Image: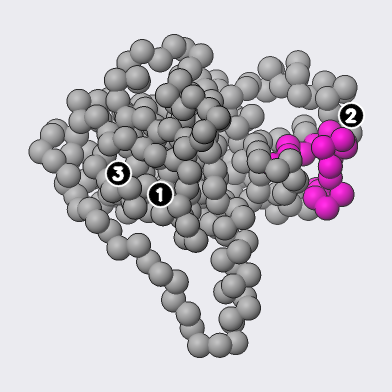
Amino acid sequence: MKPRILLYPLFILLLSVVMGCSKEADIKPDELKPTFSLPQGNHPYDKQILDFYNTYGCYMLYKFSEQDFNWNVTGTIPYVADQGDENYIGQSLEALDKHLFSFYPANFLKVALPYEIILSSRIREVDLFLDTLDNPINSVATFRHFAFGRAGSSLETMTADELKVMKSDLHKAFWSQAVGFDRIPMPPAFLKTTNYIDVYSWNKEQYGVFMGEYDDSASAYYDFVSFIEVIASKTLQELEQSLFLPQNDPKGKYRLKYNIIVNYYKQAYSVDLQAIVK
């Protein structure tokens, strides 16, 4: 199950509005005022959540309003989220630390984390053609939060394969909001490798590009977060036997861009992305 990411088009729209008004008086965007405070309860894990906020400036919420979850700059997202199950919040915090936070240095997390992390027992897509009850979503990312959709009893029954998918979904959602709103920059060399105007579904392998999730369009943003998903789900040895084979990577561009991403964050931020799947 892939995480749902709803950032980049809204970011471009917002950026164009700001640039167009740069010569006028400063315009302050509407802000969503918090409808919450910490601690949210009296459980032992509430101190953990408060300590996390004091360290990183990021709220972790298991009680949240529909507005907290749905608001995304210019509108709402097409998902609904159930409140976190208070009987499983402690386990969900352990899962987030094990599968996500432990792979990043504290100084990196202080910059890259969003305003909120929503802890939901179940996230469902609002869609007339999908059985959203049978297709739980592990993670959703917007400009101000990413949401974890396993903060409930389902966490206890997940198989090893399901946990592996959940892990890569979390990293993809984490990075999607971090780079989508310039908390963390994409590698300059990565951005220089491809002129995305030239990329189509029929020649994407020549450029080493992953296409957009919704409209099959090419962009640096969707390409990058897709590389993060690959890095977080497959070892280098697995990629040597799949994506990096000549028939799949005829120009060696997938391998090149993989190496650029891995090396850049290791050198610039001491982040070892390859360790995620070791």
Asked which secondary structure carries label 1, the reply is helix
Q: Going 25% across and 51% down the picture, which residue do you hit?
A: 54
Pointers 2 and 1 in contact (C-beta within 8 Å): no
Which amino acid, mark 1?
Asn
First-in-chain label (3 vs 1): 3
Q: Quadrant of residue 147?
A: top left
Q: Is residue 95 left or right of residue 191?
A: left
Which amino acid, mark 2?
Pro
- Among all residues in the image, which is located at the extreme front? 128
Q: Is residue 13 left or right of residue 160?
A: right
Asked if residue 102 shows in the view, the reply is no
Between marks 3 and 1, how big is the CA–CA gap?
16 Å
- Residue 189 point in image, percent of width and height: 74, 50
- Residue 8 point in image, percent of width and height: 60, 53
Residue behind mark 1 = 70
- Among all residues in the image, which is located at the extreme left? 42
Q: Going 70% across and 54% down the picture, which residue do you hit?
A: 188
Q: Which residues are magenta?
A: 193-212
Residue behind mark 2 = 250
Residue 60's disc is 3
